[in-house]
Structure formats: C-alpha cells, structure tokens
Amino acid sequence: MKAIHGLTALAVLFGSAAWAGPEIVNGPGADPECFKPWDASTKYFQWEKKDGPYRIALVNGFVGNTWRIQMIKMAKTFAEDPSIKDKIKEFKVVSTGTDAPAQLGAIEDFINQGFDAIITIAVSPDGFDRVIRLADKNDVVLVPFDNVLDTDTVMQVNEDQTEMGRNYAQFVVAQLKEQGKTGGKILEVRGVPGNSVDRDRSIGIHEVFDATGGKWDIVQVVGMWDDGTAQKVTADAIAVQGPFDGFIVQGGTTGVVQAMMDAGHPFVPIAGETENGFRKLVAKHADEGLKAISIGQSPGLVAISMKAAVSALEGNPMPQLISVPLPSADYTELEDGVNFWSDLPDNFFTTNEFAPCGVNLSGPAIMAQSESDM
C-alpha cells in the first residue's frame, strides 16, 4: 500500500507540473466593480504574469443571427479601443458553426499557434475537457462567455440566464394578473437548441409559471434567436395554435411582434430581448396594448471577456465566474436616443455600455465594422 501511495503522489506531482494552468487564490480579484464575482462562493484564479502585447483569438460558434454578427463587430471595435489596443499584438476571429468538434479543433489550433488567450461562445455546455487541459498545459487563458460551460475549471463571463428567464416570465404573469388572468396560453420562442443560454432561460421561465399554481398551456417553438426565423415560427404558431395570452421570446423579438401584427393578433404582454426594432415597436404601440419588457444579453459581453483575459494575462487574481448585470427596460421606460435609436437598424442590439468596466462602444462605430471574420 505504501508503494502505491508513493506512485500516486508522484503522479499527482508530475501531473500538476504537466497541467500548469491557474492557481486557486484568495480574493478579492482585480477591479471588482468590473469583474464582479458571481456570488460569495466564487473562487479566484491567478495565472503567471506574461509580458504583453498579447495574441488573442475569438472562436465563435453559431453565426446565423444578428446578435452574433454584432458581437463580432463589437470585438473588432473593442480591439481598437485606446484602453486596450496597445495590449493586443494580434486579434483573430473565426466562426465554426454549431458543430462542437469543429469549434474544439479551432480552439486547439489557436493554442498550438501560441495564442495567449482564447475567447469563445461554446456551442455545447460540456465536452471541452480536452481543450481545457491543453490550454492549462500551455498557460493559455480560455474564457467562455454567453453560452458558458458546465464547469468551474475555467474563467467565464456571463449574465444570469436563469434569472433572465424568471424576469421574462414574472413580467408576463404580472401583466396578465392585472387583466384578471391566472392562467392562459403562452408562446415561448426559444433560441439555438443545445446551448446553455437557451436551456437556462427556459428553466427560469418554467420555474415562474409552475410556481403560480395556475393552468398554463406553454407552446414552444424554435426561433434560433433570429428575427426571420422567429417571425416564421410565430406566424405558424398563431395560425395553428393561436391566439395566445402572452409571448416570451429569447431572441428575434422584432420578428415575433411583426408576426403578431401581420396576423392581426391582439397586442398582449410580451417579454423579449433588446433588439432596437423591438423597442421601436413597443414605444410606438404601447398605448395600443403592446405592454413589454426588454431584457438583454448584450453582445458587449465579448468586450468584458477580452478585458478579463488581458487582466488575467497580466497576472491579476480573477473570479472564476464573472457576473454581468441584466440590462432591462419596460414599456414605460423607453426613450429614443437613450435606450433605443430610431435612426439605427432594427437588428441592432441596444445594450453596449458597461460603465464599471470603462466599456462604451458607440452604435455607429460598431455598425461600421465588417461582418466577416478576420
């Protein structure tokens, strides 16, 4: 038994040398107003300091909607921002689609090329163990954001997706209660299947409806977080299963409202994303009954993730899971030029400022960027 224990100890010793990665350290971390820990139990990582400037890659997955396109534009815009430009030697972007092996292969390729940090939107919440070990072995900072991983072994950046789903549902339930309704038929327009964001938001939505004790008929359709797709599936649902008492939309909300209007569906409470077109429609039709809340998963998460990666490379202690507040506005709070813009496209996402992080990306600067990968 002693010999076995000795071999085990050697394996642990050499294993920890082979897989370097970050150390677990005590908090607080760097710039806690910007890099806010998820909760009191969040642990802290610290990587060995590297001299800059750094080579950073963004490995995106799905790119078939305007949110992802704007996110890529914002990454490019932020890479040129004076606050970080001199710290980045090279910035590369690649989109791999919804195929997990393709995304894993791209991450592995950037690690092998010697990139210092890789930012990624994971196409699946699991299956990344191999590239996490490879990143640790090579002291590469891997930062999943938006669609994050079901692991606490990497630094991640996100908003609370389950809470967002709860907030969506709480608004619709409250609006219907004001109408004397304690049940009804709801259309839930979901996002890209298999992603943690889609899963967690839907969990939050159903938690709230289940807790009311009311009789709810929740019809689910897949809108892919895309206006065109969401408009089509909503039109089909209205034609076959409508009318609905309320709508909850993870993305593609402008298309959903347009489908309602095209079908002559009465305006009913709706909770959705922060698309500029959605907010324009709500501001225009709120007095006609379009009562809505707009809660955003900002494409600007990419900028905070890039900033976090650079901070980690500089040797600062960092929370393992960084929490970004949920930007929200309901139909009583919308103001042109403040939280929506009549002169910007409908598919522009409106929440792109993070004052605690010094991130303030203007709409015109974002829209001027190319939509293609680099």
Image: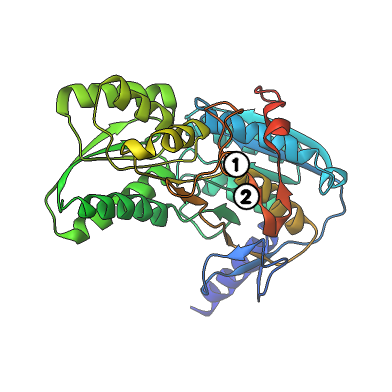
Give amino acid for label 2.
Val
Measuring from the top left, give residue 3's x and y in whole percent.
Answer: 55, 75
Pointer 1 residue: 120
Q: Could you classify mark 1 by the number of other residues whose Cα lies within 10 Å: few (under 14), some (14-19), or many (20 or more)?
A: many
Mark 2 residue element: strand
Q: Which of 199 and 236 is in front in this view?
A: 236
Mark 1 in CB contact with mark 2 (< 8 angstroms): yes
Name the residue at 63% across, 68% down. 44
Q: Quadrant of residue 278?
A: top left
Measuring from the top left, give residue 341's x and y in whole percent.
Answer: 59, 34
Judged left or right of residue 287, residue 268 is: left
Q: In which quarter of the image is residue 16?
A: bottom right
Name the residue at 37% across, 54% down. 167
- Mark pair 1, 2: CA separation: 6 Å
Q: In which quarter of the image is residue 361?
A: top right
Judged left or right of residue 273, residue 202 is: left
Pointer 2 residue: 143
Q: Which of 287 and 83 is in front in this view?
A: 287
Mark 1 residue element: strand
Measuring from the top left, give residue 49's x and y in whole percent.
Answer: 81, 60
Give amino acid for label 1.
Thr
The structure's colour scheme is rainbow
